[in-house]
Amino acid sequence: MSGPTIDRRGLLGAGVATAAALGISGVAMGEGAVLAPGVRKADLAAALQAFRGVVGDEWVAGNAGSLKPWSKSYTPDPSGRHAPVGAVCPDSVEQVQAILKIANQYRQPLWPVSTGKNMGYGSTTTAAPGQVVLDLKRMNRILSVDVELCTALVEPGVTYQQLRDYLDEHNIPLWIDVPTVGPIVGPVGNTLDRGVGYTPYGDHFMVQCGMEVVLADGEILKTGMGSTKNPSAWQAFKWGYGPYLDGIFTQSNFGVVTKMGLWLMPAPPVYKPLVVRHKKVEDVARIVDAMRPLRIANIVPNVVLMMGAAYQLAMFHRRGEVYAGAGPVPEAAFAEFAAQHDLGMWNTYIALYGTSAQVAESERIVRAAFAAIDGEVMTEDQMQGNPWFHHHATLMRGGLSLEEVGLARWKGSGGGLAWFAPVAPAKGSETQGQIDLAHQILAKYGFDYTAAFAIGMRELHHIIALLYDKSDPEEEKRADACYRELVTGFGDRGWASYRTGVHAMDLVAAQYGETNRAVNAAIKQALDPNHILAPGKSGIA
């Protein structure tokens, strides 16, 4: 069964009155706008005027006031080089094609975004100066849901909240998998940045199936089975025939994805969330080594979050509640405050899914593994009223939450947050060296170590939240310098980041070597010879 097409307008799609209230309309450029290389002020003005002819006056922005919705970011940008010079909001594939034609004519670079809520990675700000945001929020249709195959086909502006509401309204017993701020972000944008969630379907690119991509010249490519006649298997079989292309459109600037298929998870008969608490920071290696075989054998089938106490506390508390002294918060202060709030120094969240018998047997194995390393396994009944447990239990069943937005308020209302996410093998021997290096670099610049580890099937993501006061220009400069030293310091040890914000894309790309960059540059030149799609994205000019 396929669900009916819906067209729920988001924040930008409520009509002219809403658009005007947001200050979207207006195409006069700010005097201080930094243009893209080779683009004259007259070219930008002409391009914005032509965009208005495609989408209407109310869906084009081109001055400082009207661009405020696209200029806000949590990531450090001391020089202001990442602010866009315009924005255009199409509501159809045909409008995207027309906009790309105009961009090619005037050599005006575009920066495509889906919902633009990529918090901690740059939101809707651009990797390089002089770009116009191609905002796809208005393309927010759920095109189909197949209940038998457990698949969906959606446009870029569809949010996880919208998809969840659709499934609930039609009594469809399927789960979605969401990142931490699911209600306001969408599966297309998160998947294209290779984001993750916390159910067994947590690797979002692995459960993506089929794309529609508008190439820089306006041609439409449908990947996988999508280009065949009557493509009934488009959302069922990922690979199609010949080279597999979907991957080159993730973390890249090779095309504009306008439709994406994804697999949804059948609701299990039993769902049981657990947390394993450890009181000692030095237990980190033992936790990873105990968890790795459980993940590889799929006894624990979901992406596991091993949360440090500091990260957990920053979600719901402000720094001044924990420590009022100068310099980074001491470990002892975090330990004392965590103990008062029923938290360990490491809190490892896992969930079990299946029949009652399957869950009971998996729980027996999990308890034995963690009893051997002094882990305290706690159930939902035992953790009643604990907001951190409730938060993770919600995420591990595909539930929606905005609670982690609280991280940005750790140091006040300044709202500074930049994610640093290096990757290593899932081995305990890879942990303590990373923690020591992170402490060293963060302390050098006066920042706290607020971090977690995500344990995948075989990989270990070290998720460090660089929390700072963006309203303090000096602190923003220190945060920028700190982040760059994290990238290079970890990169020199072989712990390169798998994802980054617009402020560090070129630097992270450098950690992967010149051959990798040269291949990406060759693909870029072949598919986008005028370099109008997001120059600088992932370090690809």
Image: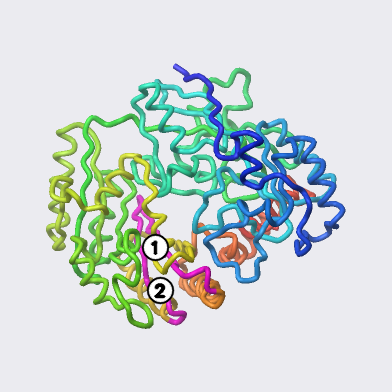
Q: Residue at x 77, y 35 (%)?
A: 54
Position of the N terminus, as image quadrant, is: top left
Relative vertical location of residue 235 with respect to residue 25 in this rendering, above or below: above
Q: Quadrant of residue 311?
A: bottom left
**What is the three-letter code of the residue carrying label 1?**
His
**What is the three-letter code of the residue carrying label 2?**
Ala
SS at circle 1: strand
The residues colored magenta run 444-472
Comes first in the chain, label 1 or label 2: 2
Position of the C terminus, as image quadrant, is: bottom right
Q: Residue at x 52, y 68 (%)?
A: 470
Q: Quadrant of residue 268?
A: top left
The reply to whether callout 1 and callout 2 are in contact (CB within 8 Å) is yes
Q: Residue at x 49, y 40 (%)?
A: 187
- 495 sits left or right of 453 in the view: right
Reading the image, the residue beneath label 2 is 438
**Tag of residue 462:** 1
Counting from the top left corner in percent of width and height, residue 409 is at: 41, 63
Counting from the top left corner in percent of width and height, residue 175 is at: 36, 33
- 494 sits left or right of 58 in the view: left
> Is residue 454 located in the magenta-colored stretch of the structure?
yes
Q: Residues within 10 Å of mark 2 (few under 14, many from 20)?
A: many
Q: Nearer the viewer, residue 476 or 187?
A: 476
> Is residue 252 located in the magenta-colored stretch of the structure?
no
Q: Residue at x 18, y 43 (%)?
A: 362
